[in-house]
Amino acid sequence: EKKKLLRLKYTPTLTLDGVPIDLMANVEMPDDAEQALDSGAVGIGLFRSEFLFMNRKGDMPSEEEQFWAYRKTAEAMKGLPVSIRTIDIGADKPLDGQDEGGHYLSPLGLRAIRWSLSEPEMFLIQIRAILRASAYGKMKILIPMLAHAQEIDQTLELINVAKKQLENECVSFDPNVQVGAMIEIPAAALSLPLFIRRLDFLSIGTNDLIQYTLAIDRADNAVAHLYDPLHPAVLRLIAGVIREAKAANMPVSVCGEMAGEPSMTKVLLGMGLTDFSMHFNQLLSVKKEILRSDMSVLKQSVDELLNAIEPEELQAALQKINAV
Ligand code: PEP
Ligand code: MG
């Protein structure tokens, strides 16, 4: 079975009706890039940079250390795009010293971009490191947990500050490096024009989108049974973001676990998704599903799924989709 999958590595990723699909990898460390390439990924859709900051007894990686980590990843990917997500710390991923509880640990607290904007000096170091690495490959900057216009504006302003600094220091970087947002808060999904107007691309973080839509703490086992990727509210939010982004010609991908779940591949294709980012282990299984999917047929059956409200209707619509 595994061998059969491996044979798919060099098969172009096209649906039955000829729609090209981009499959990218999620990674946590520069060394993962090799396996990402090995799995046939056409880029890194999500580099979870917080792993560079965790488990290091309180000290932070310097600009130089971060620069080399990003540069190494970019070079390993040989010019394929690499989206570095800026530090997504807090909640289930606390920094050392933050794990005593309080506002860092709450999924509703000072985490991800909220934390970065509260520590602008730290954030500038990371942005400078990513920009410097952009001279060695195709880097993109991906911002986690954005919800408010002023957070986007402040972030873009800091990126401009970093660019000016590097210019003044005669350090090279890609002046057109793209900046995108994780869409993982329902408020963001429901105010998409704020993001489309200001940014270059979107990536839907289904893990957090489910958490925040259903008010289920991802880290709390007592409510894990209610964490439901197929809740109609979740499906409608995801479909809405894909539709609205596509209508505006805004590149959009899904990088949460859902993207790497073969039983969800047809649903996402039917919603119009053409960019997936997932753990590299999942890539060929998802590709296998894509090769036997007809996007235009799926689009019609997904409309039924999105109209379904009762669990039985949902299950029936899902079965129909996966039988196509
Ligand atoms: C997500 O929220 O779906 C996501 C991809 O990011 P993380 O799981 O790292 O929060
Ligand atoms: Mg997330």
Image (cartoon, rainbow, N blue to C red):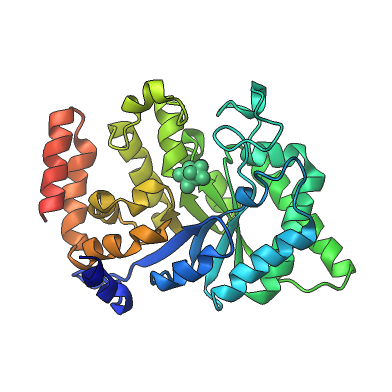
Instruction: Give me the residue at 17% from left, 65% from top.
Output: 292
In the rendered image, residue 75, in percent from the top left (x then y), is placed at 61, 75
Does residue 25 appear anywhere in the picture? yes
Does residue 192 appear anywhere in the picture? no
In the rendered image, residue 194, in percent from the top left (x then y), is placed at 56, 44
Instruction: Give me the residue at 45% from left, 72% from top.
Output: 37
**In the rendered image of this protein, does residue 310 appear above or below residue 160?**
above
Instruction: Give me the residue at 12% from left, 44% from top.
Output: 319
Does residue 163 appear left or right of residue 194 in this picture? right
Seen from the viewer's position, the closer of residues 76 and 252 is 76
Does residue 166 appear left or right of residue 313 in this picture? right
Seen from the viewer's position, the closer of residues 207 and 143 is 207
Asked which quadrant contains residue 13, the reply is: bottom left
Seen from the viewer's position, the closer of residues 109 and 176 is 109
Q: Quadrant of the C terminus?
A: bottom left
Instruction: Give me the residue at 23% from left, 49% from top.
Output: 263
In the rendered image, residue 117, in percent from the top left (x then y), is placed at 73, 40
Asked which quadrant contains residue 230, the reply is: top left
Q: Quadrant of the N terminus?
A: bottom left
| Number of numbered callouts drawn | 0
In the rendered image, residue 156, in percent from the top left (x then y), is placed at 70, 52
